[in-house]
Image (spheres, rainbow, N blue to C red):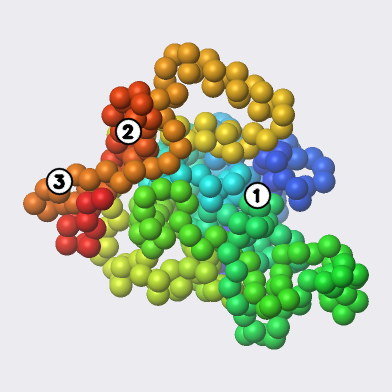
């Protein structure tokens, strides 16, 4: 009943997608059942404290809540807002997806998505987000559990914290026998190794021309720009015990990925109207998810058809750094995919942003 409480969430992250190793049944949760629960929960809360407004978790279905505007439903008149959690860390093999896809989704895709959610359904807040591009972080998927969307061999390792005592080691001894002294569940492999090192995101940038620090500086700026379209955002977390600037706001600031102060800072505006040739976001996700033999054969067939039309076969993997002449006040930052020189096709230029030259950005 405190006047300090003015909004209240009804449930946190109900599973709204089928690809989850942690869900045993009813995945994705039926949206009608979820909406019925939201209405009952809100009625119960409102009967106790009529001052607060409801926060509706989108259950990872960002653009599927126009039903909340249905006449007779209480959400618009009650001042309800949507809560969307945005993580690149659970993209399948996210650390292998090119830089340009992460940057475009953060600065362009998210911005447009959030604007559309407010128009179609309700005003939206970004209740959680991070700069992680993998799910490697220690115990992120649960105590003792390792990464599920990223090969553990691709994860980085840092010294485990001892702020509140040593974290428990593997549950298995080196010879494979169970360690009876460990409190972790059998088979746990997501915590400290025998050298006291803990898993974190890969200690490198995703594929592309930008260096580690340059990429995450750009990623942070674009993400903040994209999420500024919302009614507010919260980075997860302010401080992480296992030090990683992709999960800790203070560490992100100390790494130099943010300006010294955010007061008065305007994030850069990406050139969202310039397409990224050969890098469609949806196709990238499908290509990373595809692993079964049958799906691989289907993809081969699709690629064969596309090659027949001459749209993708001219390009090969990898990126080149494209140089461009800066203007008087700006230096252009570009990401470009290399092409097959044997086909005499010019490089694919993908202009991402124009940054003020005095911000330290130079043409690449």
Which residue is identified by label 1? 149
Residue named by callout 2: 348
Helix, strand or loop status at disc 3 = loop
Answer yes or no: is residue 315 visible: yes
Total tally of numbered discs in the picture = 3
Q: Is residue 20 left or right of residue 82?
A: right
143 vs 343, left or right, is: right
Instruction: Looking at the image, tell me whether mark 1 or mark 2 is earlier in sequence order.
Output: 1
Q: For this rendering, which residue is in front, 69 or 106?
A: 106
Count neighbours of disc 1 (C-alpha within 10 A) and say few if under 14, some if 14 to 19, many if 20 or more.
some
- The answer to whether residue 111 is visible is no
**Mark before the other along the chain sequence, 3 or 2:** 3
**Mark toward the viewer: 1 or 2:** 2
Q: How far is disc 1 from disc 3 in space, using C-alphas? A: 40 Å
Which percent across, then down, holds residue 193?
Answer: 71, 72
Residue at screen point 48% across, 68% down: 245
Identified at 27% across, 43% down, the residue is 322
Label 1 SS: loop
- Label 1, label 2: how many angstroms apart (C-alpha)? 29 Å
Q: Quadrant of residue 143?
A: bottom right
Q: Which mark is residue 325?
A: 3
Mark found first going from the N terminus, 1 or 3: 1
As drawn, the residue found furthest toward the front would be 342
Quadrant in which the N terminus is drawn: bottom right
Residue displayed at 45% across by 23% down: 313
Q: Position of residue 343 (x, y in %)?
A: 35, 23
- Badge 3 crowding class, 10 Å Cα cut-off, few under 14, some 14 to 19, many 20 or more, is few
């Amino acid at each position: 009943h405190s006047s300090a409480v003015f909004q209240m969430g009804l449930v946190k992250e109900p599973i709204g997608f089928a690809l989850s190793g942690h869900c045993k049944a009813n995945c994705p949760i039926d949206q009608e059942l979820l909406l019925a629960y939201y209405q009952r929960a809100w009625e119960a809360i409102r009967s106790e404290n009529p001052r607060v407004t409801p926060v509706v978790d989108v259950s990872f279905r960002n653009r599927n809540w126009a039903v909340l505007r249905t006449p007779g439903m209480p959400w618009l008149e009650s001042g309800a807002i949507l809560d969307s959690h945005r993580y690149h860390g659970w993209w399948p093999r996210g650390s292998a997806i090119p830089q340009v896809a992460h940057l475009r989704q953060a600065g362009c895709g998210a911005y447009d998505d959030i604007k559309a959610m407010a128009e179609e359904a309700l005003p939206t807040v970004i209740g959680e987000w991070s700069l992680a591009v993998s799910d490697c972080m220690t115990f992120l998927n649960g105590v003792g559990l390792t990464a599920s969307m990223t090969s553990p061999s691709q994860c980085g390792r840092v010294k485990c914290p001892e702020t509140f005592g040593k974290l428990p080691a593997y549950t298995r001894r080196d010879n494979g026998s169970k360690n009876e002294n460990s409190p972790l569940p059998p088979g746990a492999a997501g915590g400290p190794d025998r050298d006291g090192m803990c898993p974190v995101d890969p200690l490198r940038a995703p594929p592309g021309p930008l260096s580690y620090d340059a990429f995450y500086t750009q990623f942070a700026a674009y993400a903040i720009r994209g999420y500024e379209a919302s009614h507010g955002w919260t980075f997860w977390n302010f401080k992480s015990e296992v030090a990683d600037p992709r999960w800790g706001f203070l560490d992100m600031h100390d790494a130099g990925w943010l300006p010294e102060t955010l007061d008065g800072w305007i994030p850069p505006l990406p050139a969202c109207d310039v397409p990224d040739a050969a890098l469609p976001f949806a196709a990238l996700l499908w290509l990373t998810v595809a692993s079964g033999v049958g799906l691989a054969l289907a993809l081969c067939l699709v690629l064969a058809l596309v090659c027949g039309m001459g749209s993708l076969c001219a390009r090969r993997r990898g990126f080149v750094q494209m140089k461009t002449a800066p203007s008087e006040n700006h230096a252009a930052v570009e990401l470009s995919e290399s092409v097959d020189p044997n086909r005499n096709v010019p490089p694919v230029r993908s202009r991402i942003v124009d940054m003020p030259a005095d911000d330290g950005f130079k043409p690449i």
